């Protein structure tokens, strides 16, 4: 698609390519932070397919910061437990294990199309509507540090050029932006075909629980989507590409699951891949464009939402001159390990338990029996909140310095690197998104329920909610030299 100097040109500070959950979140945060930005997508509007289902606790905290949590809760189906098998065994109450650690314990079943609809509607209402029907084609990255990226885009009225200081590639797993940068997408494609079906009229599936079902050949998880036995079931089929009827028939027979109607079915190969870099100069990758993994832990869309939130706040800080450009490296340094951990932990665990076939059937049934006895007991120990925190994604820790380097005094407090443990007062202080400048406070608040915050310390909190530094307070004051040291490290290196 040749463009010339006569091709219409748009200029913006940040261009977001892709209006899936990741790009929409980035676009909304940038807009609220007062950064000139534009979100484009090749499609005509938000997806209509349900796709990802689960909104985890940390994503709810982000929605809360944006003033959207009530709308998610009003449309969501809450799930607090994982039941092992369709019988009435008590199962794993992960919602209870999250109580006191987050203001949003449990998982909200609020499908991807609803997330996209909510974020897109909010952007439109605030005068920053997504430009649908604009398809990214190619880009040229400037050679000098002050140059702008120039992109060629196809639109309904012909080609368009867009010039931007930064570009976020949030354009999904097959990311044309990642391809344009020639960045390797390292990892594997699973041999097994993953099946997803949204069903109506399923009986014996509890309304507020995920259910793990253990067949002779298959392992499946069901997610409650709403009343009338509205259920999502996901399972690994085998190494062949099944036709819809054959896949459903095998699942029905093996899992003894009955239903009235199929709303949606999809079968695809799961990829486990991470981009070699999340940043190449002024172009940054986020969401599925940067990492893909098994959808079973309900983490994919959440990781994308959190990438978008993290990156948009960082870009807003650099754009406003609060942080040096080098601080943008923090995005890859902090978010790539999150993606790597997900791929290594979730996918491998799922691979063992869910691999289809009679050989692994014995292992699965043993796992069910062992989990049925052990899981409720383990949840009552310290391991319960730990695992529940990983699932809810609020236990992510960003290290202030590379592993092995001496930890500076301002980063020794265990609260540094995690998101600010929530209290009623600090949640309120956290909602001022929409102000162009975040320098506010200090706020005073009481210790959190779990006692991780202390009243004799001063905490520096980043706009994305993570604690950047912490200092002891003596006689109502902190040492200026300590604060200077932390700020210098934070502002330059991010
Ligand atoms: C069938 C299916 C079922 C899934 N089920 C689950 C699940 O149960 N649980 C789970 O956690 N995850 C699931 N996922 C994964 C989940 O959908 C993704 O993790 C999530 O959508 C990532 O969001 P994203 O915004 O990064 O990417 P996407 O949602 O893929 O959004 C990318 C956007 O970029 C746009 N785009 C692409 N190319 C261009 C271009 N050239 N120019 C402009 N725009 C472009 C696309 O139109 C799209 O809107 C599923 C995915 C699929 C496909």
Image (tube, rainbow, N blue to C red):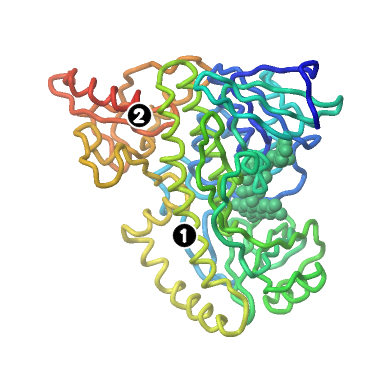
Q: Quadrant of the C terminus?
A: top left
For label 2, the SS is helix
- Please say if 456 is above or below 116: above
Image location of residue 126, percent across then percent down: 66, 19
- Please say if 81 is above or below 246: above
- Tell me, yes or no, if residue 478 can be seen here: yes
Q: Quadrant of the N terminus?
A: top right
Mark number, residue 424? none
Which of 183 and 374 lies nearest the eye of the viewer? Answer: 183
Which of 229 and 33 lies nearest the eye of the viewer? Answer: 33
The answer to which image quadrant residue 172 occupies is top right
Residue at image mark 2 = 493
Image location of residue 133, percent across then percent down: 80, 32
Label 2: few (<14), some or many (≥20) within 10 Å? some
Residue at image mark 1 = 344
The reply, left or right, for residue 38 in relation to residue 64 is right
């Amino acid at each position: 698609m040749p463009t010339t100097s006569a091709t219409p040109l748009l200029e913006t500070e940040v261009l977001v390519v892709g209006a899936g959950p990741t790009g929409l979140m980035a676009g909304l945060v940038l807009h609220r932070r007062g950064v000139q930005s534009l979100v484009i997508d090749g499609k005509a509007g938000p997806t209509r397919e349900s796709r990802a289902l689960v909104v985890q606790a940390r994503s709810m905290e982000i929605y809360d910061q944006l003033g959207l949590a009530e709308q998610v809760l009003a449309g969501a189906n809450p799930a607090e437990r994982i039941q092992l098998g369709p019988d009435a065994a008590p199962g794993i109450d992960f919602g209870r294990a999250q109580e006191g650690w987050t203001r949003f314990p449990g998982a909200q079943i609020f499908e991807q199309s609803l997330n996209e609809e909510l974020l897109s509607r909010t952007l439109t209402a605030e005068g920053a509507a997504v430009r649908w029907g604009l398809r990214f084609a190619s880009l040229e990255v400037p050679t000098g540090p002050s140059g702008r990226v120039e992109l060629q885009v196809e639109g309904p009225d012909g080609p368009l050029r867009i010039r931007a200081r930064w570009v976020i590639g949030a354009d999904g797993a097959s990311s044309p932006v990642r391809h344009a940068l020639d960045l390797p997408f390292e990892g594997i494609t699973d041999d097994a075909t993953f099946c997803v079906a949204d069903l109506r009229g399923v009986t014996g599936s509890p309304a507020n629980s995920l259910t793990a079902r253990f067949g002779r050949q298959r392992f499946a998880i069901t997610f409650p989507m709403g009343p009338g036995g509205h259920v999502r079931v996901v399972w690994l089929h085998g190494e062949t590409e099944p036709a819809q009827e054959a896949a459903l028939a095998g699942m029905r027979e093996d899992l003894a699951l009955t239903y009235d109607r199929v709303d949606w079915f999809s079968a695809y190969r799961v990829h486990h891949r991470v981009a070699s870099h999340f940043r190449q100069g002024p172009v940054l990758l986020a969401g599925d464009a940067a990492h893909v993994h098994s959808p079973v832990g309900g983490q994919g869309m959440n990781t994308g939402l959190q990438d978008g939130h993290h990156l948009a706040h960082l870009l807003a800080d650099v754009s406003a001159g609060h942080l040096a450009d080098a601080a943008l490296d923090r995005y890859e340094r902090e978010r790539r390990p999150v993606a790597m951990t997900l791929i290594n932990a979730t996918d491998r665990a799922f691979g063992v338990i869910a691999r289809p076939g009679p050989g692994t059937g014995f292992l699965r049934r043993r796992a069910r029996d062992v989990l049925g006895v052990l899981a409720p007991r383990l949840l009552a120990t310290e391991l319960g909140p730990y695992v529940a925190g990983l699932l809810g994604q609020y236990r992510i820790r960003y290290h202030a310095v590379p592993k092995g380097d001496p930890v500076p005094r301002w980063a020794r407090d265990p609260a540094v690197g995690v998101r600010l443990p929530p209290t009623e007062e600090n949640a309120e202080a956290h909602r001022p998104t929409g102000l162009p400048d975040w320098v506010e406070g200090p706020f005073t608040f009481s210790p959190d329920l779990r006692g991780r915050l202390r009243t004799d310390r001063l905490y520096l909190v980043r706009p994305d909610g993570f604690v950047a530094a912490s200092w002891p307070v003596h006689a109502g004051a902190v040492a200026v030299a300590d604060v200077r040291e932390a700020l210098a490290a934070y502002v330059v290196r991010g």
